[in-house]
Amino acid sequence: MSKNQDYDKIIRESVERVIPTIIGKLCGLHPSELLDLPTSFQRTRERRPDFLKKAVEPQQEYIIQIEFQTNTDRKMAIRMLDHYSMLLYHYGLTIRQFVIFIGNGKPNMATEIKHPELKFRFQLINLRHIDCDVFVQSPKPEEIILGILANFKGQNSLSVIQSILQNLSKHVRNSRSLRKYCTQLEILSKLRNLQPQTIQQIEAMPITYDITTDIRYQQGIEQGIEQGIEQGISFKTRKTVEKMLADSRFSLGEIADIAEVSIDYIIKVQNELSEEDQMGKK
């Protein structure tokens, strides 16, 4: 999986649950209701927005489109115009478009197009300009880890990382979920060149996660753990699947190939873990 795919996956998993917060705190919009819309449209070529919502207010309805960028795209304005025309064609509503930049440096991209017969613009938000405490002090783990991409306000990076991990530990009681969020934080920290510091602080926590241990475990180096347990699929394989699901770097297909089980079995385990997490939060 490429670096950008890593970031895209983490952003999608983290942001999907906090889209209302981002729309309110970053985009400055406060609809009374948000409705899901399909993100895949087939024209002469496919266009798939990162996030697409229908906003409902007492006196109006409109579309909110949010894109995340890790690097500068000099043709971003043209891409957003293409999205706008497609969405306008399908829904006939006003479209509010936002590009949220989460990469290094300053985003150097035009946010508007001015032609004799056309004027168009979208809003560009640099996450580095947003106070990291907006995310770090949140009770939602998906928001907390986004703090690594925001403005540290003069704080040193080590103290910010420590605050993120402390708040994660406070609000995530389930050890499996905590490992997952720590892994996601580590991946996002690459965008700020803070991965070594982040790994060091994660390893200092009582609960750590090392994927090399999982590989050895799957290969059978730790022997005897499955003795007496033969119910279709071994206990060892089940634990391997659980640990790899906690690491966002593996797709379901990759997990199935390594553990030598079916995709259906992976989905079954994933659903069972999700139910356990929900029970643990109650």
Image: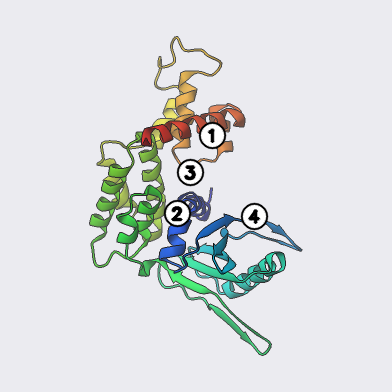
Left or right of 160 in this view: 53: right
Residue at horizontal 28 percent and vertical 43 percent from the top: 170
Which amino acid type is shown beneath numbered disc 2?
Answer: Val
Q: Secondary structure at mark 1?
A: helix
Classify 110 as above or below 250: below
Q: Nearer the viewer, mark 3 or mark 2?
A: 2
Front tag of 1 and 2: 2
Residue that label 1 marks: 255
User: Looking at the picture, how far across and down is residue 118, in whole percent?
Assistant: 66, 84
Q: Could you give the CA–CA distance between mark 3 and mark 4, rounded to whole angstroms? A: 26 Å
Q: Secondary structure at mark 4?
A: loop
Residue type at mark 3? Arg
Q: Which residue is mark 3?
A: 249
Q: Earlier in the sequence, mark 4 or mark 2?
A: 2
For residue 18, the mark is 2
Q: Quadrant of residue 278?
A: top left
Q: Find residue 101 and report its horizontal and vertical position in percent.
A: 46, 66
Whether pointer 3 and pointer 4 mark residues with C-beta atoms closer than 8 Å, the reply is no
| Mark earlier in primary sequence (1, 2) | 2
The span from disc 4 to disc 2 (Cα, nearest Å) is 18 Å
The quadrant in which the C terminus is found is top left
Query: Disc 4 designates what residue?
Result: 38
